């Protein structure tokens, strides 16, 4: 039996809308189009549900296909719909999947100052978020792609979302079997638990589909980063000389901001390093990053990041000495236990 409701998401609006309408017809369900309410925030939290406007062709249907606009926060949409763990179908246009993951455009050109939807790289971030959250990833418009390219795209999607089914769609009607079936690994996980980087940090990264050009590596170290050298390391990695890092995420520490655990969040050329709430301090004490990409040279990426760590002499100087280091990274707002502020991209 198919789950209900079904959320259809994707950064390619036209392909997503066509797919959602076709899925609604194939399953004989109502179609809900969900978009941010005018003048309202596009983000949400479980305690503050996303304000949305909903239009559909029947008000009395009990089961729906939900067409989620690109600006809707699908990670919390199940809260709004009162449907925990609602499956997400991510529709991806194979012709420009890689470009979407590197798109430097903000998610919204009209976002207010300080709104993360106005961040440089916001569109790429939304593209990777939807892939990582998906239960089913459907590649559309793939027919003219070479076999080698399709293998790479499907493996990349599987590395980003190891528990998702990844398929070359021949239309919603033919995808119904995948929607009705369990995930390749046989569990129903939360959206965060589906992310490949979380699997890598838990030493359980086992993508269902693979390609020799696509890999994920884990980087663990106990020493904090020197912020100036880290900036240089990020530029070196972004140069492409060590392969193309499409996505990296995890946790890190900066010497100049001693005692604060930070969330590392990179997609394409956009990078965010944000302070985490104090409740995470006891459990995570090291650099712990997962990097996924194409043609990655693991050894040189690791050595590039190692060069940004504190030396023995710097480590011995302690926090008082570290405070005197140059720090070109954006300043952080004050961190509170119940607030996780968002920095501009680096």
Image (cartoon, rainbow, N blue to C red):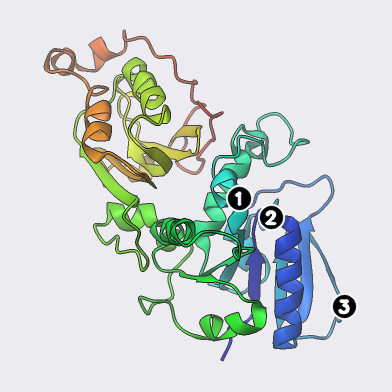
**Image marks 3 and 1: residues in contact by CB distance under 8 Å:** no
The tag on residue 57 is 3
Residue 268 versus residue 126 in the image, above or below:
above
Q: Are marks 2 and 1 in contact (CB under 8 Å)?
A: yes
Mark 2, mark 1: which one is toward the viewer?
1
Q: State the quadrant of the N terminus.
A: bottom right
Q: Is residue 331 visible?
A: yes
Tell me the residue at 49%/44% (across/down). Answer: 338
Question: Where residue 164 sits in the image (x, y, percent)?
Answer: 45, 69
* Mark 2: secondary structure: loop
User: Toward the viewer: 253 or 238?
Assistant: 238
Q: Is residue 152 above or below residue 172?
A: above
- N-terminal of the pair, mark 3 or mark 2, is 2
Secondary structure at numbered mark 3: loop
Query: Looking at this view, is 252 or 129 the one in front?
Result: 129
Callout in the foreground (3, 1): 1
Residue topped by disc 1: 96
Which residue bears the numbered disc 2?
12
> Residue 339: horizontal and vertical position, in percent?
52, 41
The crowding category of the residue bearing disc 1, from other C-alpha atoms within 10 Å (few below 14, some 14 to 19, many at least 20), is few
Question: Does 321 sit left or right of 171 as displayed?
Answer: left
CB contact under 8 Å: marks 3 and 2: no
Q: Quadrant of residue 58?
A: bottom right
């Amino acid at each position: 039996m198919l789950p209900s409701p079904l959320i259809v998401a994707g950064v390619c609006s036209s392909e997503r809308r066509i797919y959602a309408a076709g899925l609604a017809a194939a399953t004989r369900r109502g179609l809900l189009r969900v978009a941010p309410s005018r003048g309202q925030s596009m983000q949400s939290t479980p305690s503050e549900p996303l304000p949305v406007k909903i239009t559909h062709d029947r008000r009395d249907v009990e089961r729906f296909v939900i067409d989620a606009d690109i600006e809707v926060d699908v990670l919390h949409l199940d809260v709004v719909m009162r449907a925990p763990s609602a499956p997400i179908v991510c529709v991806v246009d194979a012709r420009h999947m890689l470009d979407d993951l590197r798109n430097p455009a903000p998610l919204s050109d009209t976002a207010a100052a300080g709104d993360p939807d106005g961040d440089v790289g916001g569109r790429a971030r939304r593209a990777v978020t939807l892939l990582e959250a998906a239960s089913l990833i459907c590649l559309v418009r793939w027919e003219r792609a070479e076999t080698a390219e399709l293998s790479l795209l499907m493996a990349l999607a599987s590395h980003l979302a190891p528990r998702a089914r990844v398929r070359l769609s021949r239309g919603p009607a033919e995808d119904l079997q995948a929607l009705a079936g369990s995930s390749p690994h046989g569990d129903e996980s939360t959206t965060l638990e589906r992310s490949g980087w979380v699997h890598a940090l838990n030493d359980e990264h086992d993508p269902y589909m693979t390609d020799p050009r696509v890999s994920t590596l884990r980087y663990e170290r106990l020493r904090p980063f020197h912020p100036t050298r880290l900036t240089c390391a990020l530029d070196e990695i972004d140069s492409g000389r060590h392969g193309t890092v499409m996505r990296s995420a995890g946790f890190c520490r900066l010497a100049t901001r001693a005692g604060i655990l930070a969330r590392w969040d990179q997609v394409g050329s956009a990078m965010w390093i944000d302070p985490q709430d104090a409740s995470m301090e006891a459990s995570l004490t090291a650099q712990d990053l997962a990097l996924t990409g194409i043609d990655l040279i693991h050894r040189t990426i690791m050595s590039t990041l190692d060069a940004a760590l504190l030396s023995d002499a710097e480590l011995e100087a302690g926090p008082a000495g570290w405070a005197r280091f140059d720090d070109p990274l954006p300043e952080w707002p004050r961190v509170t236990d119940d607030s996780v502020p968002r920095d501009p991209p680096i």
